[in-house]
Image: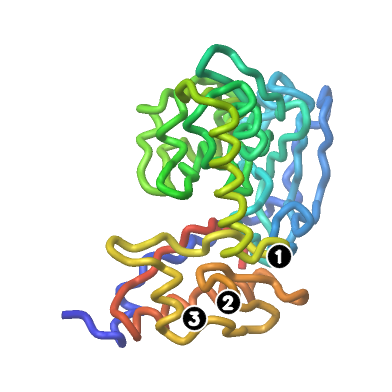
Amino acid sequence: MTQPDDWNDLDDGSAPTSTVEGAATSPVPVEGVRGRLTREAPLAKHVWFKAGGKADWLFEPADVEDLKSFLERLDGQMPVMALGVGSNMIIRDGGVPGVVIKLGQAFANIEITGETTLKAGAAAPVSMVARRAAKAGIDGLSFFIGIPGSVGGVTKMNGGCYGRETCNVLTDCDVVLPDGEFVTLSNADLQYSYRHSALPEGSTVVEARFEGFPGDPEVIKAEMDRISTQRKESQPIGSMTGGSTFKNPPGHSSWKLIDEAGLRGFRHGGAQVSEKHANFLINTGTATGSDIEELGEIVREKVYANSGVQLEWEIKRVGRP
């Protein structure tokens, strides 16, 4: 039988440190690049927590061909990370090594392709996907209205809420691998599980295709209104937050475990456990990436001490400490 004091020995939920020596000064190919390439680019403005360090390089490709060409010329010499809307991510204060890929409007298209199908660029907000599907009478995607993320993000993380997940509606997706190779991966290829996929490390989703089922636009809209209202009433909308912090352990609700440990409203530096929803961490205005991550680790430790349940991070944490 495990005891609360065993927590540090049992913990395997911390993010790895992705330190790469010399990454900031490593050369990157610039000739022929049509997108925007920025050295030492601040990332705080690109994530909902509004905290954290810089990217060694930030690349905003003009289109898919520009992205493929750029990554081919990197020749695997740098780590690559795709960044969506940053709604479920902590950027560590030491910054992100290598190249961060940020997709723009060229990757935000949404197109109805059939009676029950549509496709969307990876930068499109999934809330917009939900709205377009509803207008076209495509049911089954209304849960996307409750996710503050992009198509690329939910495809990678199997985003979901209110009993539905991306794996229930995604048919396949187009991906650019770190070496610039373009591949199409099916739902089965992604081997979806709870908030996880088998998307290759360093890959960038550029487009995804979804399938629902026929529905009444007014009925679908009413369901989306219900979800939106419930979200506004229960979550700290408008705060600098990162969404659900921890996965729900089998048979438990993370927020309830955190609440029972007496941590609702608990502060660490400029970070705080939300008063409104205990499974949300918020930046009160002065938090660093370290404040937020350390608060999360404090929560995990105290929840384990109180209940014997070990919380697992849902928020992705990246970069150097």
The foreground one among 4 and 130 is 130
Mark 2 Cα shell of 10 Å, populated few (<14), some (14-19), many (≥20): many
Which element carries disc 3, helix, strand or loop?
Answer: helix
**Residue under the point 50% across and 28% down:** 139
Among numbered discs 2 and 1, the one appearing first in the sequence: 1
Give the CA distance from mark 3 to mark 1. Answer: 19 Å
According to the picture, the residue beneath numbered tag 2 turns out to be 273
**Residue under the point 66% across and 55% down:** 96
Horizontal and vertical percent for residue 77? 61, 38
**Residue under the point 83% across and 22% down:** 32
**Residue under the point 49% across and 62% down:** 15
Q: Which colour assignment does the render follow?
A: rainbow
Could you tell me the amino acid type at mark 2? Val
Direction from residue 227 to residue 249 in the image, left or right: left
According to the picture, the residue beneath numbered tag 1 turns out to be 240
**144 to 183, vertically: above or below:** below
Give the numbered dot on residue 141: none
Horizontal and vertical percent for residue 306? 34, 85
Horizontal and vertical percent for residue 298? 49, 81
Among numbered discs 3 and 1, the one appearing first in the sequence: 1
